Amino acid sequence: MSGNTLGTLFAVTNFGESHGPAIGCVIDGCPPGLELSEADIQAELDRRRPGTSRHVTQRNEPDAVEILSGVYEGRTTGTPIGLLIRNTDQRSKDYSAIAQSFRPGHADYTYFQKYGIRDPRGGGRSSARLTAPTVAAGAVARKWLREQMGIQFRGCMTQIGEVPIPFESWEHVPNNPFYAPVADVSHLETYMDALRRAGDSCGARIRVTATGMPVGLGEPLYDRLDADIAKAMMGLNAVKGVEIGAGFASVAQRGTTHGDSLTPEGFESNNAGGVLGGISTGQDLEVSIGIKPTSSIISPRHSIDTTGQSVEVVTKGRHDPCVGIRATPIAEALLALVVMDHVLRHRAQNGGAEPPLAPIRASFL
């Protein structure tokens, strides 16, 4: 294993580089019999596709997915599913000026030190372009989980830069480029326009949830459901923090508040985020991620070159001033992949055994 595969029974191996001929993934362990077409996957890819608004990179990639294997007559066969997304709008010349220097905040320095060689074009393997295959694989997991178990995934942006975004309704999320749960995003448009003019970038906070969860997913001690969620989310480019449930707000809570009391009708709260002892409670999974400011900006910054000499770096090209804007469908996909893997692991260990108590949800919902 070389850090390119996520999952145990539902295992997704990601391949490719930002400016290579193609990117893609191989899904191993998908159950047979799932009706699956390229259109099922394309709908999710279109949600994260670049060039969809003036607030994201203008790289014009159709992100058209091709199913290479694992599907026969419209159904999965149980064999590895190969998914390919061809790169069609590379502009590698944008990176010629920084081929011998390291961009601050990027993986240029660490890749060069680790491997002794790096692909400077768009960040190569470390580019957020490689999240497209993740979303494609997540689409397969989401379809199976929705049809077989009724589990649904959704996400939204709750903060951009220093601007908090109050929650109004999930219905607003698909109607704006920020995935914001508010009707009016004009103030977010103004904020991003000013940021772009200043040649700077900002971070974001994303919330992602899973509803319809069963009880019992997760393993003690090191394969806990929340631990695997945190690992997957930290595998997303630019993520610097993950919270489950109340997260860091738990520090300021008292035990009388934080503990989710149980009643015959259900849980009274969900500070645990749907996980106790690393095992799902049947409540909604609640996950938040913190995304750092985009490292590729046109403002000059100090760095060094491959010989160790001091240089000034200006990153040209087409970049998101806030990579968090397109992160919501990626975070949803990652959560789906983790849940899918744990569903299959639970089924393998426990078979069709029912829990001794009828699952209780949350009376506060």
Image: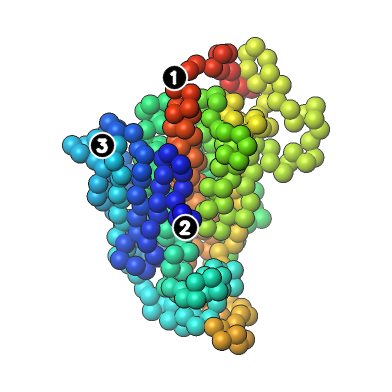
Label 3 vs label 2: CA separation? Answer: 27 Å
Q: Is residue 31 visible?
A: yes
| Residue at position x 59%, y 48% in the image | 289
Quick check: can you spot residue 151?
A: no
Q: Locate residue 110: give its quadrant.
A: bottom right
Amino acid type assigned to the residue bearing label 2 in the image: Ser
Residue 70 position, x and y percent, is 26, 42
Between the residue at mark 1 and the residue at mark 3, the CA separation in whole angstroms equals: 22 Å
Which quadrant, please, contains the C terminus?
top right
Q: Is residue 67 above or below residue 246?
A: below
Looking at the picture, how far across and down is residue 264, in whole percent? Answer: 65, 12
Q: Earlier in the sequence, mark 2 or mark 1?
A: 2
- The residue at which mark 3 appears reads as 77
Q: Which mark is residue 179?
A: none
- Local crowd at mark 1 within 10 Å, few (<14), some, or many (≥20)? few
The residue drawn where x is 43% and y is 81% is 96
- Residue type of the residue flagged with mark 1: Gly
> Which amino acid type is shown beneath numbered disc 3?
Thr
Disc 3 crowd rating (10 Å Cα; few below 14, some 14-19, many 20+) is some
Q: CA–CA distance between discs 2 and 1?
A: 34 Å
Q: Residue under label 2, please give it.
A: 2
The residue located at (42%, 26%) in the rendering is 149
- In what element is the residue under mark 2? loop
Q: Nearer the viewer, residue 365 or 98?
A: 98
Q: Earlier in the sequence, mark 1 or mark 3?
A: 3
Point out residue 301 in the picture as x, y percentages from the top left corner.
61, 78
Which of the two residues, 268 or 214, is positioned nearer the viewer here?
214
